[in-house]
Image (cartoon, grey):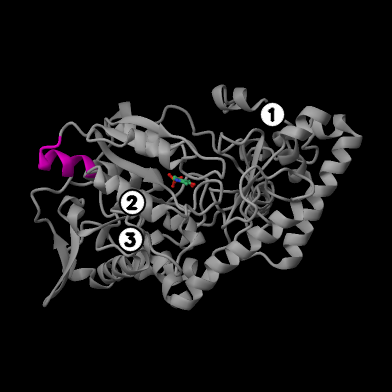
């Protein structure tokens, strides 16, 4: 059922507000300077006149028309929407964190600076890196920042011929985009039959024109790049740097560290791995962590700890400068810090282990229904192909994703990574119970069966949403946002 706009619910005279008693002397407005008539409103503002109950029901209904991880299972691969403990939200709402100003003197925000400093320390030890910056506000923003530092590093070394960034064919789209934004040329590295980096192809592309190889591990097929130490040596021997896209850290955190794998710089998605919902446009946080060789290039200001407390550090002529207006999305950092403290080393390790276990559980349940082109086992996510279903029955990946909506599940990621045809990528996350995983897999298998018997039904899904199946290309290119 659709919901009218507040203005459509409006009836003259209804109101939902109740002003507090006037605490200024009567007639105080006469003492105010007169506003120029050009600034005065000519007509009364057309505002909705609605009762409190109208407002409450309106927004409650709107909230029930959307789908979030608090409503049900959200197996969206790569863009992970996992359950995040409410205590992180509660603590991030404390007025000590919310009622501050980014321009306040450091001496008046020591507690907040300590959260940021301690978070950087924790992230350094979780990733095996030296230090980092919390300024970037998204994963892609982190990539941009990391690559900018790589660029400055080579400029400073005088190796200006290093103009290329290598990315595997399975890379997330933001990787080549961030490299291109930094003026690098993008070179794609092939995957082998196992879905891992093809070492021969990598070798053929490594020379003194390469600045960096960007890699996520596990990769976007949910497979661990088991040759990572060889890859690291190859890249470093060619004089390049290794960039870790840490958006998939939730598969390995507490068990393996990108720093130990040989990565020189990485970004993390705090809004994914560390207790802030991902998606919906943010707010996010994409800290960048570096090894010692890139530390001078980190954005400034940094947070430093001296005998007199925490303060902002500006020194370093090599810094790439600021990448955020202020310090980044501070409340997301608070949530991440609470999460890390609450989980502890063992808790983080267990979260990764459960994420991997849950993904493999669902993978095994779906094996008889879908071909899994790469990998018999997976890390935290896996990718199936609907190509056979499409060829034989006309059922596409998109059809199945829409069918899941009608059964109360958020769709998985579709058509990514592009090396799998008619791809559906699932990431059940660590927090779902075995009952939910069973119900999800059984529902999907049931949808496939029903779709084979009744193709018209699946092509029309979703049937239960306020708007039915949209032309997705038109919905993006010609959004109808007009009232
Ligand atoms: C593998 C990978 N890299 C990079 C990103 C980009 O992160 P963001 O959406 O925060 O920009 C994502 C998004 O989830 C991702 O899955």
Q: Look at the image and give the residue range highlighted in magenta.
A: 150-159
Please report the residue visible at 35 percent of the width from the left and 30 percent of the height from the top: 186
Q: Which mark is residue 470?
A: 1
In the rendered view, does 271 fall on the left or right side of 51? left
For the residues carrying marks 3 and 1, which lies nearer the camera in this image? Answer: 3
In the image, is residue 400 part of the stretch drawn in magenta? no
Residue 181: image location, x then y, percent: 31, 32
Label 1 SS: loop
Q: Along the polypeptide, which appears first: circle 3 or circle 2?
A: 2
Mark 3: secondary structure: helix
Question: In the displayed structure, would residue 402 be above or below residue 229?
Answer: above
Q: Quadrant of residue 430?
A: bottom right
Q: Return the disc, 3 or 1, that comes first in the chain's sequence.
A: 3
Of residues 170 and 20, the one nearer the viewer is 170
Q: Position of residue 302 (x, y in %)?
A: 19, 59
Residue hosting label 2 = 232
User: On screen, 93 above or below 478?
Assistant: below
Check disc 3 and report the residue beneath it.
259
Q: Is residue 27 visible?
A: no
Vertical order, 474 against 86 (above or below) = above
Ligand 1 has an atom within 8 Å of the beta carbon of the residue at disc 2: no
- Upstream in the sequence, badge 2 or badge 1? 2
Question: What's the CA distance linking mark 3 and mark 2?
Answer: 11 Å
Element at label 2: helix
Q: Quadrant of the N terminus?
A: top right
Depth check: 122 or 150 in front? 150
Q: Residue furthest front?
A: 200
Q: Is residue 284 above or below residue 331?
A: above
């Amino acid at each position: 059922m659709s919901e009218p706009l507040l203005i459509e619910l409006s009836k003259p005279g209804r109101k939902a507000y109740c002003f507090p008693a006037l605490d200024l002397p009567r007639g105080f407005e006469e003492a105010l300077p007169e506003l120029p008539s050009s600034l005065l409103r000519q007509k009364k503002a057309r505002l909705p006149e609605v009762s409190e109950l109208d407002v409450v029901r309106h927004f409650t209904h709107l909230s029930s028309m959307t789908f979030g991880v608090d409503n049900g299972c959200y197996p969206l691969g790569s863009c992970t929407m996992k359950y995040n403990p409410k205590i992180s939200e509660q603590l991030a709402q404390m007025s000590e964190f919310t009622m501050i100003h980014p321009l306040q003197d450091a001496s008046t925000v020591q507690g907040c600076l300590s959260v940021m400093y301690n978070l950087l320390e924790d992230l350094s030890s979780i990733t095996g890196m030296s230090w980092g910056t919390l300024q970037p506000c998204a994963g892609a923003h982190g990539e941009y920042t990391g690559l900018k530092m790589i660029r400055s590093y080579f400029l400073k070394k005088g190796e200006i011929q290093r103009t290329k960034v290598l990315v595997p064919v399975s890379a997330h789209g933001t990787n080549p985009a961030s490299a291109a934004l930094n003026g690098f040329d993008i070179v794609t590295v092939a995957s082998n039959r196992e879905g891992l980096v093809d070492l021969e192809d990598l070798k053929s592309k490594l020379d003194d024109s390469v600045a960096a190889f960007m890699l996520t591990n596990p990769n976007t097929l949910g497979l661990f790049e088991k040759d990572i130490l060889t890859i690291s040596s190859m890249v470093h021997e060619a004089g390049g740097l290794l960039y870790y896209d840490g958006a998939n850290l939730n598969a390995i955190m507490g068990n393996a560290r990108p720093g130990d794998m040989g990565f020189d710089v990485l970004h993390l998605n705090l809004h994914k791995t560390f207790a802030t919902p991902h998606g919906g446009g943010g707010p996010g946080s994409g800290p960048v962590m570096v090894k010692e060789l890139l530390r001078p290039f980190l954005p400034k200001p940094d947070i430093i700890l001296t005998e007199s407390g925490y303060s902002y550090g500006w020194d370093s002529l090599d810094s790439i400068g600021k990448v955020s207006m202020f310090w980044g999305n501070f409340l997301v950092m608070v949530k991440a810090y609470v999460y890390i403290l609450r989980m502890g080393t063992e808790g983080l390790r267990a979260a990764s282990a459960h994420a991997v276990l849950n993904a493999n559980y669902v993978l095994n349940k779906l094996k008889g229904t879908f071909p899994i082109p790469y990998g018999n086992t997976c890390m935290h996510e896996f990718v199936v192909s609907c190509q056979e279903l499409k060829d034989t029955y006309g059922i596409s990946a998109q059809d199945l994703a829409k069918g899941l909506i009608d059964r109360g599940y958020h769709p998985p990621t579709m058509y990514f990574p592009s090396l799998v045809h008619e791809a559906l990528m699932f990431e059940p996350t660590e927090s779902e119970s075995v009952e939910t995983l069973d119900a999800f897999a059984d529902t999907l298998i049931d949808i496939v069966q029903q779709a084979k018997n009744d193709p018209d039904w699946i092509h029309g899904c979703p049937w239960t949403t306020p708007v039915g199946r949209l032309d997705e290309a038109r919905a993006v290119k010609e959004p109808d946002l007009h009232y």
